[in-house]
Amino acid sequence: KTVSLIGAPTDVGASVRGAGMGPDALRVAGLYEMLRGHGLNVIDHGNLAGPPTPWTPPTAGVRHLEEVVAWNRAVFDRVAAVLAAGQVPLLMGGDHCLAIGSVSAVARHCRYAKKKLRVIWLDAHSDVNNPHISPSGNVHGMPVSCLLGDGPKPLVGWSGEPAAITPADIDFIGIRSVDAHEKQAIAQLGLQVFDMRHIDEHGMRNTMLEALHDVDEDTHLHVSFDLDCLDPTDAPGVGTGVRGGPTYREMQLCMEMIADTGRMGSLDVVEINPALDVRNRTAELAVEFVASLFGASTLAR
Ligand code: ARG
Ligand code: MN
Ligand code: MN
Ligand code: MN
């Protein structure tokens, strides 16, 4: 198996500056070496190029639309090329708006490869805003809507279909911050949101059994891992931290159960903000969890 690392050094969709340093933080934390150590073939494609973040206020409910499109176009093209080469793309963000490009490329690939796409969205936030309802205009709060076919026109339809995914294709884990209009959207769309209360009441094991129940041998599993899913005491280097996240142990189990399916075909690691971090702790934590996603385990298996 070959894993291709793709750096997208931008904070274009974020509210706070600094997520653009995420790719190098992951490299410094030893992402490449860790994957090699697990017997994987790894290619670091270096960083994609794109426009600087202008830090202008929203226009028609969206911030930096032109620049968000440019970055996502670069991500889409590279993820598509990596998938076409039969490799596993690992997108190193960058903020979470980049999932528009990566998941759109994955969705297009799945249609050609006749695979069933399932997305696991690990996040404190549901990211299902759109320009009409977003309180901030930041596109990192809108990627799920764009992928469902409801977003700014230039960010919709990239997979070749009006929507890259349907509501049934995505499961959310760890959610604990949902804006007022997002709550309505979640209910109307019937999205499967396993919020922190669900994890508290049912445990991570049952939650993941539910989330992964329809993964079979024809499934391509895409994991979109926003580091703010974790508790900020463990992962301080994020721009929009929310307390009350899954514990380290719960998150490890989540990753291990995803790995056990053997179906993860692509991964986003986003929202690491080294400017807010403590001695690169958040990137190092991300590397540990990515190791588990690729099958690291305490005992021989
Ligand atoms: N819901 C808030 C917003 O739309 C925060 C989104 C945070 N998203 C993220 N990927 N960290 O502005
Ligand atoms: Mn988030
Ligand atoms: Mn499901
Ligand atoms: Mn997110």
Image (tube, grey):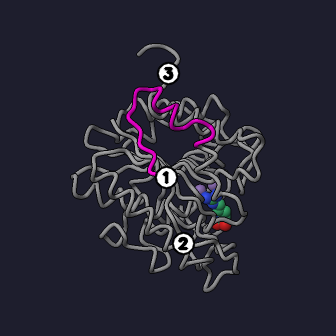
- Residue at 57% x, 30% y is 252
Q: Is mark 2 within 8 Å of ligand 1?
A: no
Residue found farthest to the top? 300
In this picture, residue 248 sits left or right of residue 295? right
Query: Which is nearer the N-term, disc 2 or disc 1?
Result: 1
Depth check: give the residue in front, 300 or 179: 300
Residue 77's x, y, as percent? 37, 63
| Residues at marks 3 and 1, CA–CA distance in whole angstroms | 28 Å
Helix, strand or loop at label 1? It is strand
| Residues at marks 3 and 2, CA–CA distance in whole angstroms | 37 Å
At label 3, the amino acid type is Ser
Find out whether residue 218 is within the magenta segment: no
Residue 14's x, y, as percent? 65, 65
Depth check: give the residue in front, 133 or 83: 83
State the extent of the magenta-drawn residues as a range.
Answer: 27-46
Q: Are marks 3 and 2 in contact (CB under 8 Å)?
A: no
Eye-nearest disc, 2 or 1: 1
Quickly name the residue at label 3: 297
- Residue at 48% x, 34% y is 293
Task: Locate residue 127: give its quadrant.
Answer: bottom right
At label 1, the amino acid type is Gly
Q: Are marks 3 and 1 in contact (CB under 8 Å)?
A: no
Quickly name the residue at label 1: 46
At label 2, the amino acid type is Val
Eye-nearest disc, 3 or 1: 1
Quickly name the residue at label 2: 68
Residue 120's x, y, as percent? 47, 47
